[in-house]
Image: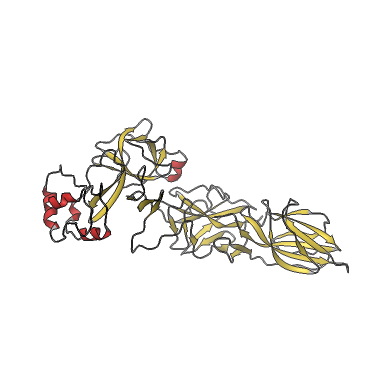
Amino acid sequence: MSQISRLKDAEISNGNLINADDIDVELNQLINESNTQDTRLIALESGNLSIDGVKTFLKAPKLDKIDARTPNAGLTLEAVTLKGGSIEIAARTAVASINTASNEVITTVSHGLVSGAAIQFITDNTLPSPLSVGTTYYARVISSVNFTVHLTQADAQNAQNVIDITTVGSGAHAVLCDPATPSNGQIWYNRAESKLKARRNGVTRSVLLTGDAAGTPKGAIRGPVIEWVSASSVKIPAGFLCRDADDSQDVVFDSDRILSITTTGVNGLDSGSEAQDTWYYVWAIADSSNTNAPAGILSASNTSPTMPSGYDRKRLLPLAIRNDSASNLLKFSIGEGWPQRPVIYYDLGETYQTGSGFTMGETNILNAGVATAWTSVSGASYIPPVSRAALFHCLNQTTSATAGYFSIRPGSSSSNGAALHLGWPSDQIRRIAVNGSQQVEYKRNAGAGLLCLDVSGFIVTEVL
């Protein structure tokens, strides 16, 4: 056993690791000893872990017979255990007691959790009912050593639907999570999040090993654009991917998801029924336990959608869609800028006639304007609250031989920037900033012109 015991305080490397040809004899001796032997092999209390050494050590033929036993009381540092032929570095905090009256878990030392943190439990006997080994739960912090347990992250963060713990179980229990106070250089495996993590320069990050696929960048949205399908539905196409709003999980669509505004729940409205002349926002949703497939919902809220049962991850996508007075979704297409600041075009067509009283397309917000003082015009029916810039079809016509010209600027304030000037005649599409109420202002400076404005599209500027 001399070579096995050396692992406790020695640096693991090719130079002092047990020879792979001799290790079988040593493992047999360890396995055949009494149950008092600490088979967790907490090997890194004072040593370092060498990648080459790990590779050599894993050549041993009987690692699958070594398993973790009793969790150490109050252990907040990482421990190395051998299990199933691999090395697991687990951070755990021992449970001191269970308060079944308040449904609180009390730890022996500071747990270091934040509300919404993913956790799992282990035990050397029986967990408190109804908790189970291998299930990911979410903690709601009560104090530095007390927390309640919830099935979803949203429930934990909103302090609702606390799991009713009816027994204290038997044996020693521990919580698997990030270390309460990780130090720079520490590496551990967070089983509840299924991530290898490390602390560096005061920041905890996920770790990629050599040969791993590159991780999805923070805040990423990529893949094909969302499509208008019909007057009642849109599509999140196969191949679309995004990070959730908490940047904790990839939401990957391996097949098309058709979101219908006429249904409620997964791939439909988040709640209630469709309202007329209303802005709706597209959300990607996911299940942190991966029990339910990624999906989408439509919501009138761009901050707090109602999440369907079984889903606890979400991401607001850079798109807003509008239905009209007949409850039909306005037809759109997504152009340049996707997905950072996409331009959303209306595919409605425009018809107009020249002369006095002329009219323009379906998205007309000003018909034959003649005001000679700054006058506000609202584009809120076709420009959503998540936009501060829109594409306007500007038509300046006159019935007089006296040429006229107009000025247009962001609305409701004389300090809202430089104006765009439209001479006569003018028929063009221009990008113009709008204020927080989706307004512009216009005035006729001279002549007898008539101004018409249609909203041809908008730029999503307020969705990250």
Along the line of sight, which residue is nearer the eye, 44 or 326?
44
On the image, the x and y values in percent for residue 419 come to: 75, 59
One can see residue 437 in this view = yes
Q: Is residue 283 above or below residue 395?
A: above
On the image, the x and y values in percent for residue 420 come to: 74, 62
**Furthest residue in direction right, as rendered:** 401
On the image, the x and y values in percent for residue 288 come to: 41, 51
**Quadrant in the picture for residue 122:** top left
Report whether 347 appears left or right of 413.
left
Report whether 54 appears left or right of 381.
left
Who's the residue at 83% across and 60% down the image? 445
Report whether 386 appears left or right of 35.
right
**Quadrant in the picture for residue 115:** top left
Who's the residue at 45% across and 38% down the image? 160
On the image, the x and y values in percent for residue 227 come to: 55, 64
Q: Is residue 405 above or below residue 183?
A: below
Q: How is the image coloured?
A: secondary structure
Report whether 137 appears left or right of 63.
right
One can see residue 190 in this view = no
Q: Is residue 185 above or below residue 100?
A: below
Quadrant where the image shows the C terminus: bottom right
